[in-house]
Amino acid sequence: MTIVMAVARRAVPDPALVLAVLGLVAVGLVMIRAATMPDPRGLSSDTVRQILYGVVGAVGLFGASRLHVGVLRRLAPLIYLGSVASLILVLALGAEEFGARRWIALGPITVQPSEFAKIATVIAVAAYAAEREPSVKFTLVTLGLALLPMALVLVEPDLGTTLVLGAAWVALVVTWGVSGRVLGGMAALGVSMLPIAFAGVPDYQRERINVFLHPDRDPLGSGFTIRQVEIALGSGGVSGQGIDGAPSALDGVATRASDFAFAQLAEQMGLIGALVVLLLFALVAWRGLEAALHSPDRFGRMLAGGLTATIVLQALMHMAVNTRLFPATGIPLPFVSTGGSALVGMCISAGLILAVASHRPTQIHDLWRER
């Protein structure tokens, strides 16, 4: 029995993490189906597309879980350079939508390189730091590795992904063991530069900040979306309005199933549905941190910790925007929101966490000896 369990563990290193991811994807499909198909029968084109992306994501998850982290570590420079090249390519040749240039069209599908840049940046920083002891010099190098993709993504513009990349870097260097004094000094420097950074904030983002600070501002214009989001959250109640395609407060919001997915599912499934989603993300956080803590080497620890932080912090940021705790930024809810690149990228991230979890000191041949 022990041997059978060990074989099963190698096939699926962490079933709880896989179930949490599949649960979030399932919740997302239900939300998208109800939001995009008024008729309770049949499936909308958005739902069918998300199912197909989910299949690709599942392949990516289980494929990534079979990778050897040592091979991934050696390929880190190529992965990073390829990601940076794709970000440059999207700025030069990318398709524009909603005033942003974030996508590369490949026939009938579009790919968003910034979603995969999150993974590449975590891999590159983890690979560099794993071979060195924390110091101010090496910390600045890791910051440079993160700043390059952050700058390219910010130009698109995509403030939400930029913030996620920055948060992932902080999580990585904390996992690395950088002292609080160094981090505090860098944080103080960053705060001192905020006035300069704010001077470069585009007008549309300034308006979002104004709406965040003054919710009653322009209720039929720039303040319409956040007003409808608040109505949706309040109307969900405990059990929700249902998933039968009933009229929604977010019917006039184009990004209801992506940037405001949490508000949409809270309206449909109520407080119960929202708590289920929170619990599933808590499970992802727990299993990801367990994989990091039990990793036999620094690279695995930083890789699992960084990717877990990327998933969880992005989820928290999305929820903060949806509950008006943070100014509006276009950022999807991992595994739940519409978007093929976002879903596939997050599934690959979960797969890499599984790859770290599978490389534990105890191997099957050790169990044979114990028998």
Image: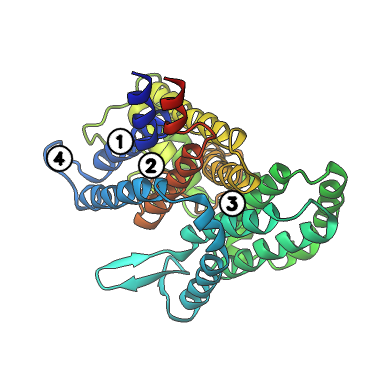
Distance between the alpha carbons at the discs numbered 3 and 4: 36 Å
Marks 2 and 4 in Cβ contact (< 8 Å): no
Return the disc, 4 or 1, that comes first in the chain's sequence. 1
Residue 336: numbered disc:
2
Q: Amino acid at mark 2?
A: Val
Q: Nearer the viewer, residue 222 or 42?
A: 42
Disc 4, SS: loop
The N terminus lies in quadrant: top left
Q: Nearer the viewer, residue 166 or 17?
A: 17
Residue sitting at 37 percent across and 42 percent down?
250
- Is residue 145 something that shows in the picture? yes
Marks 2 and 1 in Cβ contact (< 8 Å): no
Label 2 vs label 4, nearer the camera: 2
Q: Say few, some or many: other residues with alpha carbon within 10 Å of mark 2 (under 14 / 14 to 19 / 20 or more).
A: many
Return the disc, 2 or 1, that comes first in the chain's sequence. 1
Residue 164: numbered disc:
3
* Residue position marked by numbered label 1 in the rendering: 26
The C terminus lies in quadrant: top left
Q: Nearer the viewer, residue 91 or 247?
A: 91
* Percent x, y of residue 328: 55, 49
Q: Say few, some or many: other residues with alpha carbon within 10 Å of mark 3 (under 14 / 14 to 19 / 20 or more).
A: many
Q: Amino acid at mark 1?
A: Ala
Q: Nearer the viewer, residue 180 or 300?
A: 300
